[in-house]
Image (cartoon, rainbow, N blue to C red):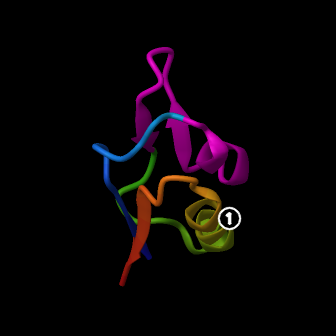
Amino acid sequence: MNVDVDFDRCEGHGLCEDQAPKVFRLDDDGDLHVEFEEIPEDQAAAVRSAIAACPVAALRERA
């Protein structure tokens, strides 16, 4: 599984980091970082929750 981030949409709410802290990280400036190029299978459910939780739809699953 992979995830696409629309960085122009991301407003740094941090809900993705709450849902999948091993995958998503906000830095001190509020910029989002994805820790993996390909999401590990054990993190897939958490990432899907993060995608659903994003209030500005900045995250999308890529097959």
The residue sitting at 65% across, 59% down in the picture is 53
Asked if residue 4 is among those painted magenta in the image, a careful observer would answer no
Instruction: Quarter of the image for the C terminus: give it.
Output: bottom left
Quarter of the view holding residue 38: bottom left
Determine whether, in the image, residue 62 is placed left or right of residue 30.
left
Residue 10, position as x, y percentages in the image? 41, 43
The residue sitting at 42% across, 69% down in the picture is 60
Asked if residue 25 is among those painted magenta in the image, a careful observer would answer yes
Question: Which sits in the foreground, 63 or 36?
Answer: 63
Q: Is residue 3 above or below residue 22?
A: below
Q: Is residue 14 above or below residue 30?
A: below
Q: Which residues are magenta?
A: 13-34
Mark 1 residue element: helix
Quarter of the view holding residue 49: bottom right
Question: Which sits in the foreground, 57 or 4?
Answer: 57
Residue 5, position as x, y percentages in the image? 35, 55
The residue sitting at 48% across, 65% down in the picture is 39
Determine whether, in the image, residue 49 is placed left or right of residue 54.
right
Quarter of the view holding residue 17: top right
The residue sitting at 49% across, 23% down in the picture is 27
Q: Provide the residue designation for mark 1.
A: 46
Residue 12, position as x, y percentages in the image? 50, 34
Identify residue type, mark 1. Answer: Ala
Determine whether, in the image, residue 44 is placed left or right of residue 32.
right
